């Protein structure tokens, strides 16, 4: 991008004309910021607030400004499946009609991303598309702020509104010859973020006219999806989140839904189940060293952890696991998470309904053992508290569980509960006698 000033007048409510910072000023502030000579508070009017805040987020997650394009997303190996099942797929003809057809010979690239920043489709001017490949602006690449720093599609997803990023406002230097405009797209029924539509090209792409065009396209896509849903044709509901089953005596499982809504369960090894439980409880991610200590505080090395992560990607799909740090790339559900959520909401009965037994009883991981104890003890205390308020049914259900059978205090609380019939009281007393005999 040329070092000429990009000053476009904007009239305020008082009639005064303001100007945007010049490219030279923004580039200079970018260099000072990434070298640590100034912080975000010093950027002031030299950099737009939306850009300054994005630079802060990019720096905080460790994006390298000299990164040679965005990191490939873990989903790159499954991009065809993502395209087929993604909720924006039915609206692709609308995007092509409104944007791609006119971009073919205009030096502009049109991109559609998923909500996590993974590029799904990249089309438009063939020459521009080839140039964009040099910075890995290709299907399957991660263009979230975490993956590529400040950029229009990634930042639009981060702030959930349309964004224009001009030249030197990009965090990564390799992207600074480009300008881009992007707008998020939402599910017309739930309002959930589905992805973003982006135009990338030369300076003219960051114009008010382009912003209006991209915004209008996003609205058209949302309306199209709504019409398809009403008509019951062409539109697929968003796929259910993967579900992790790790409670009780059954073998741990990874449950997913195919494009036809059919459930598919994949059995997991104990180590893989341990890893997924720990990653689900640490959404910020874990380094290989930290994960090794959580899995085994004595004998496990980083090389073994990396090998296990490589195997796990093959089992559940590379699109679900990120690295550096190791993390889940999209939210999942789990039976342990559902129990904790119910307890947090004060729904003890709901928690008990979802609790089928202890967490991964065969696991040797100290972190999993601690989590197992935490969950069991929290549920037990909540049940005892509810039973003191008259919910004897919950106490009975707890005592029928494997860990409840040896819960002496629980059985004594049941025996001493008023309103218990003679048979139930006798059974509780007999169970107590058996426990006392076993314990000496």
Image (spheres, rainbow, N blue to C red):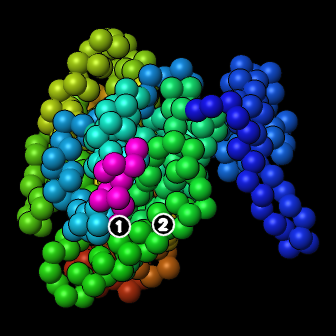
Of 124 and 189, the residue lying toward us: 124
The quarter of the rendered structure image containing the N terminus is top right
* Above or below: residue 363 compared with residue 390: above
Check if mark 1's residue and mark 2's residue have beta carbons within 8 Å: yes
Q: Is residue 166 left or right of residue 341?
A: right
The secondary structure that most of the magenta stretch takes on is: helix
Q: Which residue is at a point 86% across and 73% down the rendered structure image?
A: 13
Badge 2 element: helix
**Where's residue 120, x and y in %?**
28, 49
Residue for badge 1: 98
Query: In terms of image quadrants, where is residue 369?
Result: top left
* Above or below: residue 297 compared with residue 392: above
Residue for badge 2: 213
**Where's residue 250, x and y in %?**
13, 49
Q: CA distance from mark 1 to mark 2?
A: 8 Å
**Where's residue 75, x and y in %?**
26, 40
Q: Is residue 411 visible?
A: no
**Image disc number at residue 252:** none
The quarter of the rendered structure image containing the C terminus is top left
């Amino acid at each position: 991008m040329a070092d000429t000033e990009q000053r476009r007048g904007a009239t305020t409510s008082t009639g005064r004309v303001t100007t945007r910072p010049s490219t030279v000023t923004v580039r200079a502030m970018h260099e000072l910021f990434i070298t640590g000579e100034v912080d975000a508070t010093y950027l002031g009017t030299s950099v737009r607030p939306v850009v300054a805040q994005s630079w802060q987020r990019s720096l905080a997650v460790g994006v390298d400004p000299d990164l040679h394009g965005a990191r490939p997303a873990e989903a790159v190996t499954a991009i065809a499946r993502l395209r087929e099942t993604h909720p924006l797929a039915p609206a692709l003809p609308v995007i092509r009609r409104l944007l791609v057809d006119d971009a073919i010979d205009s030096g502009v690239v049109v991109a559609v991303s998923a909500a996590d920043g993974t590029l799904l489709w990249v089309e438009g001017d063939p020459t521009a598309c080839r140039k964009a490949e040099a910075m890995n602006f290709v299907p399957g690449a991660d263009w979230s702020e975490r993956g590529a720093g400040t950029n229009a599609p990634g930042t639009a997803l981060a702030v959930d509104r349309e964004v224009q990023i001009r030249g030197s406002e990009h965090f990564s230097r390799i992207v600074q010859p480009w300008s881009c405009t992007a707008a998020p797209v939402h599910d017309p029924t739930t309002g959930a973020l589905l992805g973003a539509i982006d135009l990338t090209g030369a300076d003219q792409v960051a114009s008010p006219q382009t912003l209006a065009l991209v915004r209008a396209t996003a609205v058209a896509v949302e309306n199209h999806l709504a019409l398809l849903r009403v008509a019951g044709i062409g539109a697929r509901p968003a796929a259910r989140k993967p579900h992790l089953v790790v409670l009780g005596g059954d073998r741990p499982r990874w449950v997913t839904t195919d494009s036809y809504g059919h459930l598919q369960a994949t059995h997991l090894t104990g180590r893989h189940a341990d890893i997924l439980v720990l990653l689900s409880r640490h959404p910020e991610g874990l380094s290989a060293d930290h994960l090794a200590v959580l899995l085994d505080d004595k004998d496990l090395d980083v090389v073994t952890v990396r090998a296990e992560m490589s195997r796990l990607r093959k089992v559940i799909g590379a699109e679900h696991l990120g690295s550096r740090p190791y993390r889940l790339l999209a939210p999942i559900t789990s039976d342990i998470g559902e129990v904790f959520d119910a307890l947090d909401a004060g729904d003890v009965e709901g928690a008990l309904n979802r609790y089928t037994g202890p967490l991964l009883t065969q696991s040797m991981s100290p972190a999993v053992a601690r989590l197992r104890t935490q969950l069991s003890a929290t549920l037990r205390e909540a049940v005892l508290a509810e039973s003191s308020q008259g919910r004897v049914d919950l106490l009975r259900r707890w005592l029928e569980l494997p860990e409840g059978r040896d819960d002496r205090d629980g059985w004594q609380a049941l025996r001493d509960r008023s309103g218990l019939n003679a048979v139930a009281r006798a059974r509780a007393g007999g169970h107590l006698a058996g426990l006392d005999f076993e314990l000496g």
